[in-house]
Amino acid sequence: MTPDSIVKVTNRGMITIPASLRKKYGLRDGDQVIVVEDEGILKIIPLESIESLQNRSITTKEMLEILKRSREEELELEE
């Protein structure tokens, strides 16, 4: 953990994501993220914009392969 990854929570529950992480994950003003609690750990997950998803050209075959791999990984984690 680096000092620039430590953030404070304001009295309104807001935090500032460090610039280095915003740049790394391509986060810009107005982008949305989801905050999830996973086994006592808070995770911040960037949500892709509709425009970004529309610009991505992915075939049905590629999507099915991604889903298949995802299912396999999930089954491995359950074992």
Image: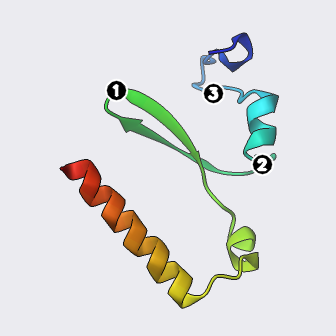
Outermost residue on the top side: it is 3
3D distance between C-alphas at marks 1 and 2: 26 Å
Q: Secondary structure at mark 2?
A: loop
Three-letter amino acid code of the residue under disc 3: Met
Q: Earlier in the sequence, mark 1 or mark 3?
A: 3
Q: Nearer the viewer, mark 1 or mark 3?
A: 1
Name the residue at 75% across, 27% down: 18
Residue 9 spot, x, y in % from top left: 60, 18
3D distance between C-alphas at marks 1 and 3: 19 Å
Name the residue at 80% across, 30% down: 20
The N terminus is located in which quarter?
Answer: top right
Q: Is residue 27 above or below residue 50?
A: above
Three-letter amino acid code of the residue under disc 1: Gly
From the image, tell me which residue sits under label 2. Answer: 26
Three-letter amino acid code of the residue under disc 2: Gly
From the image, tell me which residue sits under label 1. Answer: 40
**Quadrant of the image occupied by residue 48:** bottom right
Q: Is residue 22 left or right of residue 46?
A: right
Mark 3 Cα-neighbour bin, 10 Å: few <14, some 14–19, many ≥20: few
From the image, tell me which residue sits under label 3. Answer: 14
Q: Are marks 2 and 3 in contact (CB under 8 Å)?
A: no
Q: Is residue 27 left or right of residue 70?
A: right
Q: Secondary structure at mark 1?
A: loop
Residue 57 spot, x, y in % from top left: 70, 82
Q: Nearer the viewer, residue 24 or 35?
A: 24
Q: Secondary structure at mark 3?
A: loop
Q: Earlier in the sequence, mark 1 or mark 2?
A: 2
Q: Are marks 1 and 3 in contact (CB under 8 Å)?
A: no
Q: Is residue 21 above or below residue 12?
A: below
Name the residue at 32% across, 64% down: 72
Q: How many marks?
A: 3
3D distance between C-alphas at marks 2 and 3: 20 Å
